Amino acid sequence: MNESQNDPSEDEWTAKLRMVLDDAKKAAQDDDLGPRLEVVDRLTDFIEESFPNDARVHALDNIAAQAATGLLEQTIEKRLQNIAARNVELARLNKTFEAATASAQEEAATLRLGRVRSVLTVLDQGLSAIKDLRDVLKTGTDRELTASLDKALGAIQDVRAQLQRQ
């Protein structure tokens, strides 16, 4: 079966298992043991080759193992019932992980926003310090330094404005 070509993602592993389960459904209707054993071998290969070894892939492996066992049931009805149960379990698992992915994406966005806010706070503090220094220097005689500080202040304000828009 060689399921591990080109390092598939977890979504691709899910799709591969769904394809094998579709073949298992067809094989389950056959009284001949040969086609069923062929699919059992493909399911075993899936379990051996799927990665990474995280919770989602372990759950996919569990579904594959149960489907392989189900293909060896005595009656067609029991085999089809077992394969149908594995398809339902796969759909539930996929839904669970989609929800977890969405939650993780929301959390990541919140973390990014927190970092941007931290950067903005630091920039605000820097702007304040530069303004204070500029005000002190304006009363002195070094006009070139004051002009340079004004340019730096403008650049920092531009960066801050861009970060604030994101």
Image: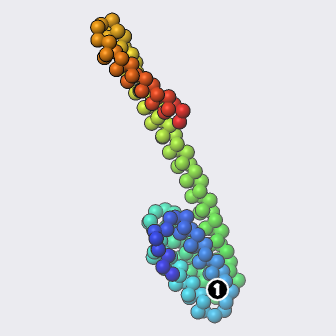
Q: How is the image coloured?
A: rainbow
Q: Nearer the viewer, residue 108 or 124?
A: 124
Spot occupied by residue 11 in the image (x, y as percentages of width and height): 55, 64
Looking at the image, which residue sits at the far top? 139
The residue lying toward the viewer, choosing from 55 and 119, is: 119
Tell me the residue at 63%/63% (across/down). 92
- Residue at which label 1 appears: 27
* Quarter assignment of residue 67: bottom right
- Residue 133 can be seen, yes or no: no
- Foreground: 107 or 149? 149
The residue nearer to you, when weighing 75 against 26, is: 26
Above or below for 48 versus 163: below
Q: Is residue 132 above or below residue 112?
A: above
CA neighbours of label 1 inside 10 A, class few (<14), some (14 to 19), many (20+): many
Task: Say left or right for 80 vs 51.
Answer: right
Q: Amino acid at mark 1?
A: Ala
**46 shown above or below 136:** below
As drawn, 90 above or below 43: above
